[in-house]
């Protein structure tokens, strides 16, 4: 057991480190690292993580008008989760230098791409083009000691999370094989047209913070996903999904899986994306649509999604990689950045979020776009950006998303302050490039709010799990939880 003085000293060091060496701490943080705290018991000490967790619990309240029927589609599969380094070693692959590949064609491509992202601690997803080689790798993964099978695919994972709320009826549409159907929550309704004879499998290669393979050392825990998935890759369930909405009568639609088409080649995705836009446009204008994005590498494809899909959805969810790539593809703010260095700068993130809502959303009153909400999540913090007048209860929504990230990563029902740590910046700015406001984190009121024009930003830190049990599906759980606590206002301002 740590000595009391040691706890206080370590906490002070941690706060100093998190503040990136700046000699002045935000005033509201001084209380939590005062020398007096060393005189109390470990149970009663003021720990930043416990204060934030308690504050979250008081802020998270369900909206006045809640969703009752949510339709989710269209990517679904079975995830095979294994140790990435362990599986690659079992495939007789040696460590070496990393190199990203937009599409994987061989085991060597897999090794290089895995190393590339492992050394950055970044999540990624790629298509494996060779069906037979993929099957052999999948067989080895399923037989690898400790391999686990889970519900997979953004839509299925979001559906599973939503189904934990008894008052919600959930429709899931996607390629659902017998194994996946067996694993789904019994509260989830699967239309007959979505059932197929065989399952689609995705391989999830996980690595832990500090794990080493050759000269590569992971700065944080994450995963690399790959598959040879034609059903999801062609979004073959999309028309079935849209057709089922008339009978199901949802009050919210959640759409994911567009990223899967990227690996099918330009000719297919150009044609299929047009069909997807037509199908999405058939959904009633009174039904809000949330689009969940995922890892992509083709700038033309991402730009097409921005131009054609984003304006016809109400909300999007994305992480730091997808946010920066979106800006790079569309020539947005900070597009010159090759990658984020460490924790993404809050001001730069704010600039890109505002650009999305101005360029492709309803921030401009004269715009006919439907997009009014962006839920951004990264390891250290989350930001919800919403056009004023459309959404309510967003303080609860952003904190609920952060809370589930902390608890689910650690495999606990609630946040355990001893298993998590604060990695969010303690001081930051509302923008990186224009007239900006200096902001800071208050642990007792851990949602920082600022406005830029008619867009309001809600930011909260994440209590990062020190030893995460599973990182797959965290983004989907975050978006699902944020949506549960979000309320779409009935009165529209424009």
Image (tube, grey):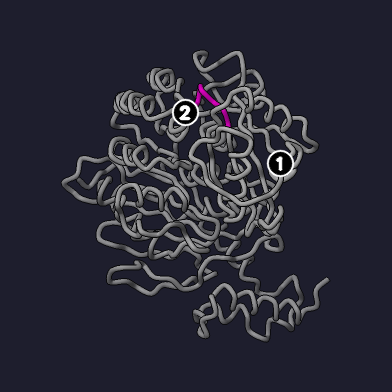
| Magenta stretch, residue numbers | 227-232
5 and 358: which is toward the camera: 358
Q: Which of marks 2 and 1 is nearer the N terminus?
A: 2
The span from disc 2 to disc 1 (Cα, nearest Å) is: 36 Å
Instruction: From this view, report whether residue 9 is shown above or below residue 141.
Output: below
Residue 231 colored in magenta in the image = yes
Would you say residue 439 is visible in this rendering? yes
Q: Could you tell me how many numbered marks the image carries?
A: 2
Picture residue at 47% right of the left edge, 41% below the top:
294
User: What is the secondary structure assignment of the residue under circle 2?
Assistant: strand
Picture residue at 61% right of the left edge, 17% below the top:
198
- Is 81 on the left or on the right of 106, as rendered? right
User: What is the secondary structure assignment of the residue under circle 1?
Assistant: loop
Residue 95 is situated, as x and y percent measured from the top left of the image, at 69, 49
Residue 234 colored in magenta in the image = no
- Is 13 on the left or on the right of 307, as rendered? right
Would you say residue 68 is visible in this rendering? no
430 and 185: which is toward the camera: 430
- Is 146 on the left or on the right of 357, as rendered? right
Query: Pointer 1: what residue?
Result: 93
Picture residue at 25% right of the left edge, 44% below the top:
492
**Quadrant of the image for the N terminus?**
bottom right
- Is 183 on the left or on the right of 368, as rendered? right
Location of residue 457 (image quadrant): bottom left
């Amino acid at each position: 057991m740590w000595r009391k003085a040691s706890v206080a000293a370590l906490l002070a060091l941690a706060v100093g480190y998190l503040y990136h060496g700046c000699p002045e701490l935000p005033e509201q943080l001084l209380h939590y690292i005062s020398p007096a705290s060393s005189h109390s018991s470990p149970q009663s000490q003021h720990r930043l993580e416990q204060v934030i967790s308690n504050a979250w619990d008081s802020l998270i309240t369900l909206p006045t008008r809640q969703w009752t029927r949510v339709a989710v589609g269209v990517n679904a599969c079975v995830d095979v989760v294994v140790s990435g380094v362990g599986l690659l070693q079992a495939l007789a692959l040696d460590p070496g230098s990393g190199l990203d590949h937009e599409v994987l064609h061989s085991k060597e491509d897999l090794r290089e791409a895995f190393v590339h992202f492992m050394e950055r601690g970044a999540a990624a997803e790629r298509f494996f083009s060779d069906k037979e080689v993929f099957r052999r790798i999948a067989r080895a993964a399923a037989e690898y000691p400790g391999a686990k099978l889970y519900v997979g695919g953004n839509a299925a994972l979001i559906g599973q999370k939503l189904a934990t709320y008894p008052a919600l009826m959930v429709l899931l549409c996607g390629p659902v094989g017998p194994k996946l159907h067996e694993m789904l929550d019994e509260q989830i309704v699967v239309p007959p047209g979505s059932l197929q004879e065989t399952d689609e499998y995705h391989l999830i290669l996980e690595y832990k913070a500090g794990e080493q393979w050759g000269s590569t050392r992971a700065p944080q825990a994450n995963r690399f996903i790959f598959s040879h998935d034609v059903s999801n890759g062609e979004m073959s369930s999309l028309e079935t999904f849209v057709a089922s909405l008339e009978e199901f009568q949802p009050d919210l639609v959640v759409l994911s899986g567009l990223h899967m088409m990227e690996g099918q080649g330009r000719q297919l995705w150009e044609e299929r994306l047009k069909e997807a836009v037509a199908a999405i446009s058939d959904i009633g204008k009174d039904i809000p649509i949330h689009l969940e994005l995922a890892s992509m590498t083709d700038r033309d494809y991402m730009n097409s999604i921005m131009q054609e899909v984003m304006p016809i959805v109400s909300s999007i969810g994305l992480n730091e990689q997808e946010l920066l790539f979106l800006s790079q593809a569309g020539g947005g703010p900070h597009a010159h950045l090759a990658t984020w260095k460490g924790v993404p700068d809050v001001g730069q993130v704010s600039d890109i979020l505002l650009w999305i809502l101005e360029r492709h959303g309803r921030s401009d009153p004269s715009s006919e776009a439907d997009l009014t909400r962006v839920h951004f999540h990264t390891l250290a913090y989350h930001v919800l950006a919403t056009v004023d007048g459309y959404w309510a209860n967003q303080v609860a929504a952003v904190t609920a998303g952060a809370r589930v990230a902390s608890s689910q990563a650690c495999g606990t029902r609630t946040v355990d302050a001893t298993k998590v740590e604060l990695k969010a910046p303690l001081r930051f700015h509302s923008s990186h490039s224009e007239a900006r406001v200096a902001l800071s984190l208050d642990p007792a009121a851990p949602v920082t709010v600022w406005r830029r024009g008619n867009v309001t930003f809600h930011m909260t830190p994440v209590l990062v799990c020190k030893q995460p049990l599973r990182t797959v599906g965290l983004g989907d759980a975050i978006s699902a939880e944020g949506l549960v606590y979000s309320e779409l206002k009935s009165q529209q301002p424009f």
